Image (cartoon, rainbow, N blue to C red):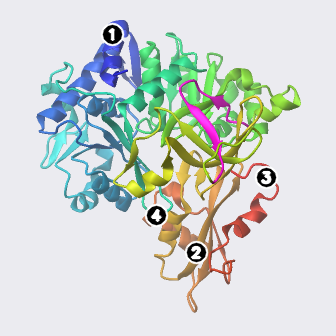
Amino acid sequence: MNITIRDILNKIVQRHGDREILVFQDSRFTGRQYVERVYRLGNALLGLGLKKGDRVALLLNNSNFSAECFRGANSAGMPFVSLNARNAVPEHIYILNDSGAKALIAGEEFLPLMDKILPGAPDLEHVIVVPGKNKGQFLSYEELLVTAPSTEPDVDITAEDPYSIRYTSGTTGKPKGVLQLFRSDITQLYNSLMEGLEIRKSDVVALTAPVTHASGSQIMPHMAKGAKVVIMAGFDPENLLKTIEKEKITTLYLVPTMIVMLINHPTLKNYDISTIRTIRYGASPIAPNVLKKAMGIFGDVFLQGYGLTEASMPITLLTKEDHIPDGTEKSVKRLKSIGREVLIAKVGIQDPECKILPDGQTGEICVKSDQVMKEYWNNPEATRETLVDGWLHTGDMGYRDEDGYLYLVDRKKDMIISGGFNIYPREVEDALYLHESVLEAAVVGIPDEKWGETVMAFVVLKENKTATENEIIAHCREQLAGYKKPTSVKFLDELPKNANGKILKKDLKAPYWEDQERKI
């Protein structure tokens, strides 16, 4: 079926053109106003000389602009490239160059970084500042929109055209660009509408996580139903509680860390949260006692989704009906699962020879779906390793029970998930090795009640060199996004190794995970 995002945008205008469907602070937009701004951006990009297939990078904090920009690029057949606002300058430069982005749309708050970023990204042809003013090499977003037509861009796009390149950190130390096609975007929309979200026209969803990343996947399913999307600048428990009461929020999209902070907030009881009927969570494990407490506060409103950058959420869902904290032994155990596969996805548990394992046996979780990526951008070797015979190998280890529920057990690779963010130890280790006093380093994830996991570094210092824990952490913060830096550093005389000299990370992790049932 050759359906693309423009078909969905046109239906939003037809069905919900006069309904208020987007809110950011004091700015409010109807369906028609939103789509017109999206199309104006698409036409403005074409007017600058960009063409179908050119990559448009986005460096934006949450706002109505971020909700407009990725769809504006898409409307002209241009895949967007998400830049994480928390990344360090070298990470931005690498992604801009690897993706070959022709344009960068950046918030005004990022202007101080441009003097550091732009010399390292010579292929960039245009820098558009949001909302901005035309000044020197910088173009104003709002001024571009004013002069651009609000009609559908005159570019033919198909389901097999590129939709986005999202970068995920790699075990080799360099991020990998995940290329998704429009068919993935639309299949994700189908699955979101067909499965447990139960979106109604009267719903109001609040989005606190970056909408140019996973959180943005909730925008189209809600708008397609005529529901309202309230975008928040970020996650702040007090502000979110105020917004729930003011906007009569019905739906939240949270990671477990946010749930922990929300249910433990001292002013929670001061606000009316009775309108909440759905809280969708995912990205990292949630402790059963935390979930039980949250259900005691909000009720039977929780829904868990599993997915990854290479296979957009939802791939599996643990529905509201599956959340039974005081039921049978089987139903209580089910709270630790990631649910069952959605209708338009197939999940197989495979052994090292890529054979499907029977129920109850642990293997690698593999996925077949139109939601799966086309490839890793400019990385055929990694693509061949990850896409095998039509199956996406996720790197997550797990098993399926006799009722079809999937359970995560461990990760095949060393990725750490802290507060919903993916962190690969190799990146952190590379940063550690740049410190003049570090001889050897190893990074692992250790359990953390608030964040799920946190980054711990084990360091061996060079002879006659010194360093403190605070110095090492500060050094990493200069090289990496803040969420990737170690939260603790342990100094050792030597790292444990096998006969071949390979560092035994399992030995380093073991004391911290020995009392944990789930090693992820």
Per the image, is 276 magenta? no
**Under tag 3, what secondary structure?**
loop
Q: Distance between the residues labelled 3 and 1?
A: 51 Å
Q: Residue 41 carries which label?
A: none
Q: Is the residue marked by circle 3 packed among few (<14), some (14-19), or many (20+) residues within 10 Å?
A: few
Q: State whether residue 453 is above or below residue 11.
A: below
The residue labelled by disc 2 is 441
Name the residue beneath numbered marker 3.
516
Label 2 vs 4, first from the N-terminus: 4
Quarter of the figure with the N terminus: top left
Whether residue 326 sits left or right of residue 53 in the image: it is: right
Mark 3 is on which residue type? Gln
Residue 20 position within the rendered picture, expressed as x and y whole percent measured from the top left = 39, 13
- Asked which quadrant contains residue 463, the reply is bottom right
Q: Do the residues labelled 2 and 4 touch (CB within 8 Å)?
A: no
Give yes or no for residue 349 being in the magenta stretch: yes
Residue 89 located left or right of residue 204: left
* Residue segment shown in magenta: 337-352
Q: In this view, does 375 lie above or below 320?
A: below
Residue 480 image offset from top left, x and y in percent: 45, 61
Q: Which residue lies furthest to the bottom in this view?
A: 464
| Residue identified by numbered label 1 | 17
| Distance (Cα) linking label 4 and label 1 | 46 Å
Cα–Cα gap, marks 4 and 3: 28 Å
Residue 283 lies, in percent from the top left, at 59, 41
Q: Which residue does the image show at 43% across and 35% down from the upper left?
A: 211
Earlier residue among tags 4 and 1: 1
Residue for badge 4: 173
Task: State the separation of the CA atoms marked 2 and 3.
Answer: 25 Å
